[in-house]
Image (cartoon, rainbow, N blue to C red):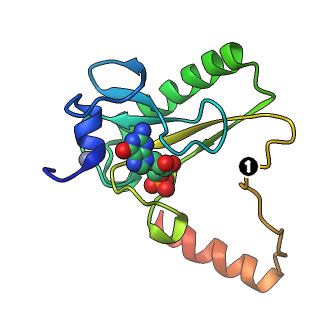
Amino acid sequence: MGDCIFCKIAQGEIPAATLWEDEEFRVILDLGPASKGHALILPKKHAANIYEMTDEMVGKAMILAKKMAAAMSKALHCDGFNIVQNNGETAGQTVFHFHIHLIPRYEGDNVGLSWVPGSLDEKERDEILEQVKACL
Ligand code: 5GP
Ligand code: ZN
């Protein structure tokens, strides 16, 4: 993926503030942080989104997210923590190389990750159950 910015960062071709690195991942500080300490987990091997990742790599990424969230919470004394992963433009993905957002949360930080709750009617509920189960 010659023109993928996160490939270049993950593989160390472009320098980035690195919190953690191993053979398969690099964890960097986000250049446009939602809160103090906002970081990104990047796999070194390109995958555009979660569907292009192997199950094994998704598992490893989530285990690393837990480790980072615990360490960052301890170090930064945040009050809560969001682990966010966007797939597709409609879902807010802007860089098409899989990444997990690690977002420390602080009382009154005004980070906008909330939504207005809708309602679940019975007909729609049953349709969703049928449609999704048919694809599993
Ligand atoms: P997405 O919207 O795709 O889920 O998240 C992309 C994230 O990458 C954003 O939070 C954005 O600030 C961050 N970002 C984009 N380009 C760069 C970059 O070159 N370096 C770093 N460290 N973060 C970046
Ligand atoms: Zn890439």
Q: What residue occupies the far bottom of the structure in this picture?
A: 123
Query: Is 104 on the left or on the right of 8, as rendered?
Result: right
Instruction: Give the image quarter of residue 24.
Output: top left
Q: How many marks?
A: 1
Q: Residue at (50%, 26%) from the top-left corner?
A: 63
Which amino acid is tagged 1? Val
Badge 1: how crowded within 10 Å, few (<14), some, or many (20+)?
A: few
In the image, 123 versus 13, the foreground residue is 13
Q: Residue at (65%, 72%) from the top-left corner?
A: 129
In the image, 120 versus 6, the foreground residue is 6
Q: Name the residue tied to disc 1.
A: 111
Q: What residue occupies the far left of the structure in this picture?
A: 2
Instruction: Give the image quarter of residue 25.
Output: top left
Query: Is 80 on the left or on the right of 7, as rendered?
Result: right
The answer to whether 24 is drawn above or below residue 87 in the figure is: above
The answer to whether 19 is drawn above or below residue 16 in the figure is: above
Instruction: Give the image quarter of residue 56.
Output: top left
The answer to whether 101 is drawn above or below residue 76 in the figure is: below
In the image, 122 versus 77, the foreground residue is 77
The spot of residue 37 in percent (x, y) is 60, 29
In what element is the residue under mark 1?
loop
For label 1, being within 8 Å of ligand 1 is answered no
Q: Residue at (73%, 82%) from the top-left corner?
A: 124
The spot of residue 21 in percent (x, y) is 35, 19
Query: Is 7 on the left or on the right of 40, as rendered?
Result: left
Query: Is 66 on the left or on the right of 9, as rendered?
Result: right
Q: Residue at (55%, 22%) from the top-left corner?
A: 68
The spot of residue 61 in percent (x, y) is 44, 32
The answer to whether 38 is drawn above or below residue 133 in the figure is: above
The spot of residue 32 in percent (x, y) is 53, 45
